[in-house]
Image (cartoon, rainbow, N blue to C red):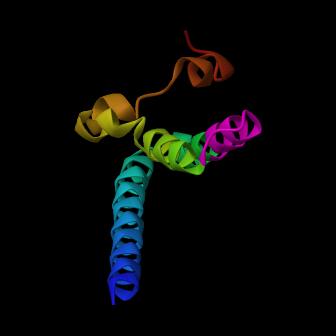
Amino acid sequence: MNGRLLRVAQVEVAQIGRSYLETVNVLANTIEGRDAYTHGHVERVAEYARALAGSLGWAPEHLRMLEFGARLHDIGKIVIPDTILKQTRGADRRRNGKR
C-alpha cells in the first residue's frame, strides 16, 4: 500500500513539473512573440546551457533548474513597451547606412 501511494505521489509531482515547464514555455513564447528579431533565442539559450552544464557533469535536478532559468532569462521584456522593444537595433542601423 505505501509503495502504491509513493508511486502516485511521484506521478503527481512529475505532472506538476511538466505543467510548470509548460507555463514557463508559454511565458518565453509570449516574450519571443513580441520581438521577431530574437525568434528562437530562448530555445537556443536553454539548449546551450543544458549542453554546457551536462558536459560539466551537473546533476539532472540542477539541469532542470538551469533550463527554467534559461527560458526565463528575458522575462523582463514582458513589461518593455513595443516602441522600445521593436526599435531598430544598432547593427541594423549600421547595415542600412544610418548611425
Of all residues, the one furthest to the front in this rendering is 1
Range drawn in magenta = 47-59
Give the vertical position of 14 relative to 60 (above or below). below
Q: Residue at the location (32% across, 28% down)? A: 84
Give the vertical position of 28 relative to 2 (above or below). above
| x and y percentages locating residue 28 in the rendered image | 41, 51
Q: Residue at the location (44% across, 39% down)? A: 69
Q: Residue at the location (71% across, 38% down)? A: 57
The answer to whether residue 84 is left or right of residue 89 is left
| x and y percentages locating residue 9 in the rendered image | 33, 76
Would you identify the image quadrant in which residue 81 lies?
Answer: top left
Give the vertical position of 71 relative to 87 (above or below). below
Can you say which quadrant of the picture contains the C terminus?
top right
| x and y percentages locating residue 37 in the rendered image | 54, 40
Of all residues, the one furthest to the top in this rendering is 99
Q: Give the main secondary structure, helix, strand or loop, of the magenta stretch.
A: helix
Total labels: the figure holds 0
> Is 71 in front, or is 65?
65
| x and y percentages locating residue 17 in the rendered image | 39, 64
Of all residues, the one furthest to the right in this rendering is 55
Would you identify the image quadrant in which residue 38 lies?
Answer: top right
Q: Residue at the location (33% across, 90% down)? A: 1
Residue 48 part of the magenta-drawn span: yes
> Is 83 in front, or is 14?
14
> Is 13 in front, or is 96?
13
Residue 67 part of the magenta-drawn span: no
The answer to whether residue 61 is left or right of residue 5 is right
